[in-house]
Amino acid sequence: MKKINLENIDVDKYATKFKENDFLQSLFKIVKKAGQKVVYAGLILFFMYIDNDTPSKAKAAIAGALGYLLVPFDLIPDFIPVVGFADDFSVVLAALSYAAVCIKEDHKDLAVKKMKEWFDDFSEEEVEMLNSIIFKKKEEK
């Protein structure tokens, strides 16, 4: 794996994207969208967990991942801006990958419904890529 440092990045190209006046608002939007994806993935796991058809072995993995998501002081504390939920998302995705054969369209539909209820600006388009990864894993298993 190539080490990433500033010499390997076209800083000038990305510097044009930075606008001091808009930075905090733009950063908030990024964090909110990333946060919504973590919540969405967590909801899918939750709906899998409460489904009687989900095997107990998968439920154990799901419970562990959801518990990890709820603990604010884990590997990377959740209060650290931007990266605080990166480890949570990784654990949730690992659980989704592990339990992929148990995922149903209903779980996704229930998660989408709850997201629309909780977030006024939620769009299914925001999680299309995540859904394609999750459901591709199911097809592979």
Image: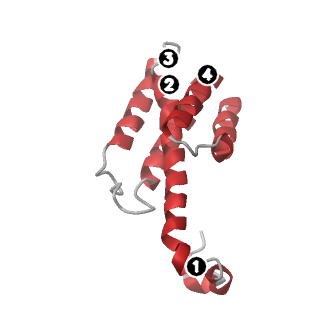
Q: CA distance from mark 4 to mark 1?
A: 42 Å
Percent position (x, y) of residue 16?
65, 82
Callouts 1 and 2 close, C-beta under 8 Å? no
Q: Earlier in the sequence, mark 3 or mark 1?
A: 1
Identify the residue under disc 1.
19
Q: Secondary structure at mark 4?
A: helix
Label ID, residue 106: 4
Dot 4 or dot 1, earlier in sequence: 1
* In front of the other: 119 or 136: 119
> How busy is the neighbourhood of tag 4: few (under 14 within 10 Å), some, or many (20 plus)?
few
Q: Nearer the viewer, mark 3 or mark 4?
A: 4
- Is the Cβ of the residue at disc 3 closer than 8 Å to that at disc 4? yes
Q: Which residue is mark 3?
A: 51
Mark 3 or mark 4: name the one nearer the start of the chain. Answer: 3
Q: CA distance from mark 4 to mark 2?
A: 8 Å
Give the percent coordinates (x, y) of residue 131: 65, 38
Nearest-to-viewer mark from 3 and 1: 1
Q: CA distance from mark 3 to mark 4?
A: 10 Å
Dot 1 or dot 2, earlier in sequence:
1
The reply to whether callout 3 and callout 2 are in contact (CB within 8 Å) is: yes
**Within 10 angstroms of label 3, few (less than 14), some, or many (20 or more) residues?**
some
Verify CB contact (< 8 Å) between mark 4 and mark 2: yes
Query: Could one spot residue 94 in this view of the protein?
Result: no
Neighbor class of circle 1 (other Cα within 10 Å; few <14, some 14-19, many 20+) is few
Label 2 environment density (alpha carbons within 10 Å; few <14, some 14–19, many ≥20): some
- Residue topped by disc 2: 47
Point 51% across, 18% down: residue: 54
Residue 81 place in picture, x, y as percent: 40, 63
Please report contact status of discs 4 and 1: CB closer than 8 Å, yes or no.
no
Disc 1 is placed on an element classified as: loop
